Amino acid sequence: VALDSNKEPLRPCLLWMDARSAKQTEEIMNVCAGDPALDVNCGGKGPISAEWMTPKALWIRQNEPDIWEKADTICEYQDYINYKLTGVMCASSCNAATRWHWNGEQCLSQIPKKGTTITKDVDNKNSNPSSYAGRPISMYKKLGIPELLQKLPERCIPMGSLVGHLTSDAAQHLSLPENLPVAQGGPDAFV
């Protein structure tokens, strides 16, 4: 889901079954051959699925550059639903590890606390490298999309962890109690 600075969708969501980024999967394998990020979920040999975040983000960058430029956040549909329920934007470590080429264990080793701002200047030598623990920065740079790091959710939490509590708007819309806890999930194929 590509969201503007108000967390409103800029275009219809590219769901997992949307395979229009098949060409980008080949590009990633060619351009990023040998990059450690590919070892995380395909042993570096492929294939990469058009279902995954990086090919979809690269497709948006290459085919809808105006949307790419306007996008403040690019996230999974699950992240967006959790945001609409709780007002909290965060990623599932399961999604990040299986579909984003992140090293899930490393990204969880440095979980930013809710409300913590991460310095996201990838090229700034004064940035805290632990802010990017597990993120495939070298792969994004090779693909010419280093700014994807700034567009993805900062927080990454494990499945079962508390995302937040149901907002009053969400509670009213769903006819559920306000402040109901919302837990982090993951993709059905990997849970």
Image (cartoon, rainbow, N blue to C red):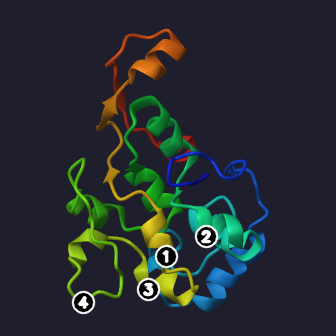
Task: Name the residue type under label 4.
Answer: Lys
Q: CA distance from mark 3 to mark 2?
A: 21 Å
Q: CA distance from mark 4 to mark 3?
A: 15 Å
Disc 3: which residue: 138
Instruction: From this view, report whether residue 8 is shown above or below residue 71.
Output: above
Disc 4: which residue: 125
The residue that appears at 62% across and 47% down in the rendered structure is: 9
- Of labels 2 and 1, the one closer to you: 2
Marks 4 and 3, the one that precedes in the sequence = 4
Marks 1 and 4, the one that precedes in the sequence = 4
Q: Are marks 2 and 1 in contact (CB under 8 Å)?
A: no
- Of labels 3 and 1, the one closer to you: 1
Q: Could you tell me residue 8's position as x and y percent? A: 58, 45
Q: Are marks 3 and 2 in contact (CB under 8 Å)?
A: no
Q: Are marks 2 and 4 in contact (CB under 8 Å)?
A: no
Q: CA distance from mark 3 to mark 1?
A: 12 Å
- Of labels 2 and 4, the one closer to you: 2
Q: Quadrant of residue 82?
A: top left
Is 148 displayed left or right of 156 in the figure? Answer: right
Badge count: 4
Q: CA distance from mark 2 to mark 4?
A: 25 Å
Instruction: From this view, report whether residue 136 is shown above or below residue 77.
Output: below
Q: Could you tell me residue 106's position as x and y percent? A: 28, 67
Q: Nearer the viewer, residue 37 or 85?
A: 85
